[in-house]
Image (cartoon, rainbow, N blue to C red):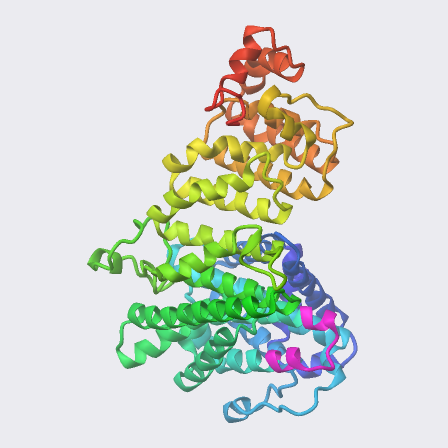
Amino acid sequence: EFFSKLIIDPIVDLAQDATRKLSTGGNSRYYVAWRILSKLSDGDKEAGASRSGIGSLQTAIQKLFINAGNDCKTLTKNLLQAVYKIGILSLGIDNHASQHDLSSPNTGEFDEDFFERNTAAMRTGAWCILEALTNCLVNSSEARTGANISLKQAVRSSAIDCSFVVLSLKKLKELGNSVDISPANKATLAATSRNCLKVISKIGGLVPLKDAKKCSSDLMQDLKSFSLPNDLIPSTISALVAFTKRICNDSGKDVIDECDEWINALLDRCECAIESWLSSLSRHGRIETDDERLLTRILFCIGELTMVGFSSQQDTLQPRTKSARDMVTDKEPVRGLIVRPSNRLIHLVKLMLPTTMPITSVNEEDLTPTPSCVRAYAFVTLGKLCLRDESLAKDCLNILARELHHGSKSDPAVQSNVLMVMGDLCVRYTNLVDRYLPFMAACLQAGDKACHEVVTDVNLTVDPSAIKVRNYSLVKKNAILLLSSLVLQDYIKWRGLFIHRFLAAVADEDDEVSCLARTALRGPLLEKQPNLLSNSFVEAIFVFNSCKAHPIYCAAAASGETGTGVAV
């Protein structure tokens, strides 16, 4: 009720005469609602905040639909109309313009009013709530939202022109490319553009054919030029899939075949770009900042293209038989599509994994180091390739585990990404990855001096004087969250020194790490296995005090696969 009065009611009220109501007295209630929504969208730029921001808003809207009952259709119609009007108003488009006028935006100088506080809040908030609203309506066919109206029905009943999403995306791009825009405003525009692309991926099938073709061509060119920042690449590819489905619905062509064609064309483009860059590197012998940015975009694009059509229920490299086609739904039009990158492209990705590039520098003495950010993206891309190909995963697990090994001294960003990849592979190929649990568990002490001594001493003693690398805190926190999730879902079991490593994390010098480990142990992990701590108490005393003469310590030390206790 509070959410409805504070945010929804003022927005719905703007469905009629929005311009007049915003320009007269007593308009503060409207601006407050948009500012709250813009804060949710701003949180989208923070790590891990997307799900909590947009996701929370989506949950609130779902409950609102349930409470609305028979009035749900009217509420949805008014919400869409209000967001539509505010969306075009905040981008400088007259909301009384005809559809012909909407297809011809003003590309002249940008007015400073675009970034006036209230205008910026309305623009950001409008796309934030539109993304959450379309997500709710898309899921309505699965009876999970409480809405008794589909997205297609809602759009038609509200009589909005869906071409406005294409126009808005173009205007946002023009604003973002302007040299007069501050970095802070560019970051906000990028987040809004991402919301817009996600909305397009939901309602792309309702966009007029001419606009769909034009926007699809523009998005394809953006991907081919590698000009998009990494956070826009996934939503751009999703929007392209939606437009492809829209075009195929009119032409009668198969959407999977059409997507397969442009995906492979983009992968070929990525392959040529990496080879060209390697050729340039061999001549100049150094890697510039622009080179790093280009490489990370190429690698990230490869990974995202590979994941198009991915389904955890589908067998790897399964031919596109009739059964695979039966997996296609309106929500996932290319589900079951298998993307097969060339062996050459896979090899090029692997070349980015080592700490040095596969060519010598100009002075023929020192090898050219591979930037950590490039290696971090390369491992993520390799992980996505492995998710689609089990044989490749078998070949690459040792490479991944090597980066988690206690003696690898890998960069924290690289190690964190590898850990997350191993977690996904553990879910996908549990039997293959289970033997590498010790390496994943070792990340609970990533960067600790004790972690490097454990090979011979199995020394998990918490030593305050141990040298700790602060940057490894992220690796430890990710390890706690990931391993806890895998245990709770029964993908891994408590064995070896796993429990002792978790207990050692409770006493970590970083307060955030220790608090997170304590919360995980006291909460869901203990609830799932009430005897976990009591069963491990005696053994923990001998392990943490390095009582090597006692049989209990020896048994714990021998519990690892190598007999040292640190195959954990």
- Is 557 contained in the magenta span? no
Part of the protein shown in magenta:
172-187
Residue plotted at (39% across, 83% down): 209
Residue 130 visible in rendering: no
In the image: residue 247, left or right of residue 97:
left
Q: Could you tell me residue 102's position as x and y percent?
A: 54, 89
Most extreme residue toward the left is: 322
Q: Could you tell me residue 98's position as x and y percent?
A: 53, 92
Residue plotted at (49% across, 22% down): 560
Q: Could you tell me residue 205's position as x and y percent?
A: 40, 74
Residue plotted at (56% across, 74% down): 227
Up-down: is 18 above or below 140?
A: below
Most extreme residue toward the top is: 550
Query: In which quadrant of the rendered view does residue 194 lie?
Result: bottom right
In the image: residue 266, left or right of residue 336:
right
Q: Could you tell me residue 390's position as x and y percent?
A: 34, 46
In the image: residue 365, left or right of residue 236:
right
Front-most of residues 100 and 396: 396
Up-down: is 322 above or below 400?
A: below
Up-down: is 92 above or below 130?
A: below
Front-most of residues 488 and 350: 350
